[in-house]
Image (cartoon, rainbow, N blue to C red):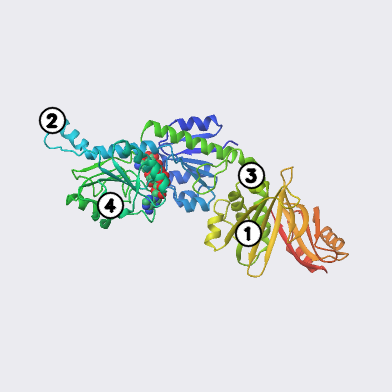
Amino acid sequence: MAPRVLISDKLSPAAVQIFKDRGIEVDFQPDLGKDKDRLAEIIGQYDGLAIRSATKVTPKILQKADRLKVIGRAGIGVDNVDLPAATAKGVIVMNTPFGNSITTAEHAIAMMFALAREIPAADASTQAGKWEKNRFMGVEVTAKTLGIIGCGNIGSIVAERGVGLKMKVIAFDPFLSVERALDLGVEKVELDDLLARADFITLHTPLTEKTKNILSAQNIAKTKKGVRIINCARGGLVDEAALRAALDSKHVAGAAFDVFAVEPAEQNPLFGHPNVVCTPHLGAATNEAQENVALQVAEQMSDYLLTGAISNAVNFPSITAEEAPKLKPFIELAEKLGSFAGQLTDTDIKTVHIVYEGAVADQKVKALTSAAVAGLLRPMLSEVNVVSAPTVAKERGIVIEETTRAATGDYDSLITVTVVTDTLERAISGTVFADGRPRIVNIKGINVDAEFAPSMIYVTNEDKPGFIGRFAGLLGDAGLNIATFALGRDHLGGDAIALVAVDGTVPAEVLGKVQALPQVKAARALVF
Ligand SMILES: NC(=O)C1=CN([C@@H]2O[C@H](COP(=O)(O)OP(=O)(O)OC[C@H]3O[C@@H](n4cnc5c(N)ncnc54)[C@H](O)[C@@H]3O)[C@@H](O)[C@H]2O)C=CC1
Ligand SMILES: O=C(O)CCC(=O)C(=O)O
């Protein structure tokens, strides 16, 4: 069955065509995003959801999204998606990190000029027939100081444009390297320095706990008198009431805002001030940017739904279309090794150590680790999945360690999952043979060669004669057909293991009888 995608926002129709061309069924309902109840009603029919900013993907909607595998944001900010809820549900959330950056940077520059020359007010006055030539007296931007808060993709483009306009550009961004600042022709400064020196301040950070109200009343008070402030990033970065007060007192000469604490902004403290210019979140609104992000999101979502390739996911490592098929059997192996370990572990897990040896070490081991941890936790927590596993493990205080190294033994690729609890340490290794099927090759240091099967019995026993006959006879008497039988031991007469695939589930009383056999130390029924 072809995957189905819902587009619930005003995306360029270019996206619809891409989905169709890729053989994906697409439902384009550009106004649906505003109707939360209707979206919740129908979301269960789709494998993918493509959005801009109008659709709010809430936990309630995700709860109903039983088929949903991917949410694609045609744009940058994913703050309209409840990421923890999407992750918990195993839904990949992707964005298009560069498609609208130039357009948004250009909007910030346009807003700067709109403020410098009061273009909107002059336009309104002129068209009202007033010809107020003496009312409007602007400022030049040349040689003025442009302070950029957040010098990432968009901030860097604004910086380059600022340098081109012969401005002195300074930037506050804890993650901006000195080399990058030099490349951009920008002086890297601390926030207080920027506030004190900038004639224009433009914000380009995401909204986080750290950046919320980064221009607070206190910080606005530290700015240079006559400063002009531009926000084309996210509402909430500036305390709007405090800014209004600073505009009223004429400490701040002007403010140009594209984004607001509450959107759609029908009322706002900034509205109505003569030195304020507002646009309705138009930063990304050019044909070029919308075409870019729509094409990109449709390609990315199609890749994921059709091939498993992941790009620009904000809650999972990237996997290319070439890597995806190679990774697939190892994802299955990692998940099953984790599941094996999880089903054997009854006490609190402290640490999981995953060793990747040989060719597999060159693959995307982060994705494999997520799969192993998901498999490990699933016997204890039914809600965990490959996307959410690392977060869930972290919440439970489980330390995840990863090691990659060259092959040391007989296998081209080997994955070993070691689980450490307060009382034991248990390691299970596996590989993928040329047939693409995952195999268990070592349990607790004992070599075996077993395929995973839906229903298995794992026995640890003393290596003494008579066990196999009694064990097989017992299963036969219980009507349980043995599909495969794998044995291993550490040394003659020492510790032995049996890993048996059976047809059908293992009744508890049969397991009890196995457990009661002489020489048996422990017996477990496992499901994969
Ligand atoms: N108005 C609009 O329509 C649009 C708005 N945006 C918004 O613009 C913002 C920037 O987007 P990009 O440049 O693509 O993001 P980005 O991730 O490339 O850059 C953000 C920068 O902010 C910096 N940063 C993070 N925390 C900081 C802090 N506490 N102080 C100072 N700097 C900090 C980061 O180091 C990074 O360099 C985002 O919020 C995005 O959602 C993006 C596109 C369109
Ligand atoms: O899609 C839009 O119009 C908003 C763009 C935006 O805010 C973003 O990409 O972060």
- N-terminal-most mark, 3 or 4: 4
- Residue nearest the viewer, comparing 12 with 68: 12
- N-terminal-most mark, 1 or 2: 2
Residue that carries the numbered disc 4 in the rendered image? 195
Where residue 151 appears, x then y in whole percent? Answer: 38, 46
Can residue 65 be seen at all in this image of the molecule? yes
Whether pointer 1 and pointer 2 mark residues with C-beta atoms closer than 8 Å, the reply is: no
On screen, 240 above or below 24? below
Name the kind of residue labelled 4 in the image.
Leu
User: What whole-number distance in Å separates the C-alpha atoms at marks 4 and 2?
Assistant: 39 Å
Closest to the camera, between mark 1 and mark 2, is: 1
Judge the density around disc 1: few (<14), some (14-19), many (≥20) Cα neighbours within 10 Å: some
Residue that carries the numbered disc 3 in the rendered image? 327
- Residue for point 11% across, 35% down: 134
Name the kind of residue labelled 2 in the image.
Gly
Q: Is residue 330 left or right of residue 238?
A: right
User: What whole-number distance in Å separates the C-alpha atoms at marks 1 and 3?
Assistant: 20 Å
- N-terminal-most mark, 4 or 2: 2
- N-terminal-most mark, 2 or 3: 2
Q: Secondary structure at mark 1?
A: strand
Name the disc covering residue 353, or none. Answer: 1
User: What whole-number distance in Å separates the C-alpha atoms at marks 4 and 1?
Assistant: 47 Å
- Residue for point 16% across, 31% down: 126
Residue that carries the numbered disc 2 in the rendered image? 129
Judge the density around disc 2: few (<14), some (14-19), many (≥20) Cα neighbours within 10 Å: few
On screen, 32 above or below 18? below
